Amino acid sequence: MHVLGREDNAERVDVGDANRDDADDDRGDADRAPETAASPPTVRLGSFLARDGSAGAAVGVDADRPHASVVFGKRGTGKSYTLGVLAEGLADAPGVSPVVVDPMGVFGGLRAAGGRVIEPTVRPDEIPASAWPDLLGLDPTGGPGGLVWRVVADAVDGSAANTVDESGTDAGTTCPTIAELRDRVAATDAPPDARRAAANHLQLAATWGAFDADSPPVTDLAADGTPTVLDLSGVPEAAGEAVVRAVASGLYDARVDGALDRLPWLLVDEAHAFFGGVADPALRTLLTRGRAPGVSLVCATQRPGALPSVAVSQSDLLVCHRLTAERDVARLAEADATYLAGDLASRLPTGTGEALVVDDATETAHTVRVRERRTPHEGGSPRASDAAESEGPR
């Protein structure tokens, strides 16, 4: 098997030989990368795609070391499907924990791989005080925005300092609730208009259902290796950004502090929706500094041009399905001109499930066919013909 992202690839296969039959083809348990005591964790991605369209040698993705990766593809070409394939493989790999951000509600099929699907909540103090005005759509330099910033900072600092009970026992840090933050706003000497606006915006945040002062720590999402799907479908955009900010920062901090043994993989579908807002700093931290503590990030999007340049420049593995928009193709070309020289658009595959894979570890590009998933894929578009068939003849 050729393993992408692994420089010391002892099983590297010459792409010129990729048209020979693959004994480990896309069937049943063959999709599971064999693990031995001597073999590093590997995720089975698929097979090389020969020029005649036949499947060649098996292709995997290294799961032994942390990686920053992107998965591109216009709607319907297999982007989310590929993200599910990676999540399946990571569920089988020892020593890692996949966490999937699911804005569209299409990864529920991972339950078949032992995964859990949750509607996540985070503690209010897991969002920095400086980010709260932006989260609530307030100007941080204005009256209401500045008031929220100050109230959250004071509440968090106060709860952190007040960790010893009357008996002298460390009681741990308590987290303020949204209701308590509103009470603190009302108790300030700020102008009435600022207090009213700040309180109203905090009340709006409470209706999102994304904040719970008693939420378990983020480390619980990745403690045992069980695939965890964060179902953000149906929640407001700001609530989703708050969850991604808290989870990305929490996983990074846990590895830096030594509070998490497993190497977490954060897989974010529709990633373009989480850059440029509250979640942006945490995702950029994973892209630029996540490798050192061992946190991997995979960003999947149908709009590569909407991602920041750092998402491509810092990625060591790119999986690109069909793209047609000039801006999106140009963003892919930012990866490295040396091994993506020539007419890039002409090299992109046209078939669903086919992808151009750019491996920075070996500075090579390959065309692959992504294997079939073992778990149900819920990202397909509904068909009117299916509805008509279920209704029967009229």
Image (tube, rainbow, N blue to C red):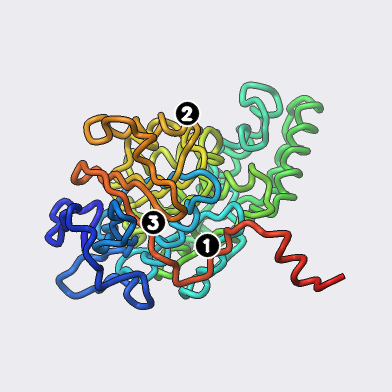
Decide: marks 3, 1 in contact (CB < 8 A)? no
Instruction: Please give the residue where the numbered disc 3 appears in the rendered image.
Output: 265
Spatial distance from mark 3 to mark 1, Cα to Cα?
12 Å
The first of marks 2 and 3 along the sequence is 3
Instruction: Tell me the element at label 1.
Output: strand
Classify residue 165 as left or right of residue 89. right
Q: Quadrant of residue 331?
A: top left
Spatial distance from mark 2 to mark 1, Cα to Cα?
31 Å
Residue in view at x 34 percent, y 52 percent:
295
Taking the view exactly as shown, the residue that stands out farthest to the front is 52
In front of the other: 306 or 268 = 306
| Quadrant for the N terminus in the image | bottom left
What percent of the width, then of the height, locates residue 166?
A: 55, 60
Residue 206: numbered disc? none
Q: Quadrant of residue 154?
A: top right
Classify residue 289 as left or right of residue 11. right
The first of marks 2 and 1 along the sequence is 1
Instruction: Tell me the element at label 2.
Output: helix
| Quadrant for the C terminus in the image | bottom right
Instruction: Tell me the element at label 3.
Output: strand
What percent of the width, then of the height, locates residue 109?
A: 54, 69
Instruction: Please give the residue where the numbered disc 2 appears in the rendered image.
Output: 327
